[in-house]
Image (cartoon, helix red, strand yellow):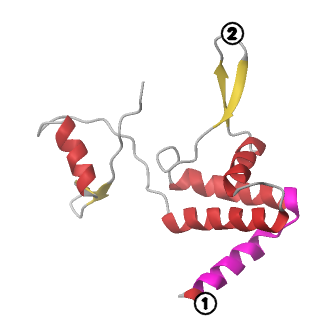
Amino acid sequence: MSEMPWALFEVQEDFSLKPKRALDLELVQARFKPGATVIGKYKRSRSKPQHDLYWEILRRVVKGTGRWHAPEDLHEAIKLDLRMVTGLSMMNGEVRFIARSTSFTAMDDDEFQEFFQSAMQSIAEATGIDTDDLIAEIKGDERRAA
């Protein structure tokens, strides 16, 4: 069973919700009639700049240490280190653990903030890298590039 598509909405001055993108409006129009009652979950949208910062940190850690093949591998290692796992019961009864998602739809901004801080601590403990210094370096590079 696949997940229902998700849409982004912007809160208006009168607290009504307006679809953020044309795709979001299309998703609503395809599924609901005017006046329909819809159940939703309140989630604050994630910060794209922080998402980009996270992946740049991982890229630099991978490049600087050589311990992981790619940033995605480090990301999976962090999730496992932080025990962000779900037990999956296999057909033979064996239980295997898989890393949970940190996607924009799986984690809101508050959850990602907590994950980000824990991930920085995990990186620092595993590599000895001062992640605060690394973040300052990245932000300095971004200012110089602008």
Q: Give the quadrant of residue 45.
A: bottom left
Q: Is residue 135 above or below residue 97?
A: below
Q: Is residue 72 left or right of residue 103?
A: right
Secondary structure of the residue carrying numbered label 1: helix
| Name of the residue lying farthest toward the right | 128
Residue 108 x/y as whole percent: 50, 51
- Residue 92 circle label: 2
User: In the rendered structure, does residue 143 fall within the stretch colored magenta?
Assistant: yes
Query: Going 86% across and 56% down the picture, which residue do you hit?
Result: 126
> Furthest residue to the top?
92
**Label 1 belongs to which residue?**
144
Percent across and percent down for residue 115 are 65, 52
- Say whether disc 1 or disc 2 marks the residue closer to the N-terminus: 2
Magenta run includes residue 104? no
Which amino acid type corresponds to the residue marked 2 in the rendered image?
A: Asn
- Residue shown at the point (50%, 63%) measured from the top left: 47
x and y percentages locating residue 12 in the rendered image: 24, 61
Q: Which residues are magenta?
A: 125-144
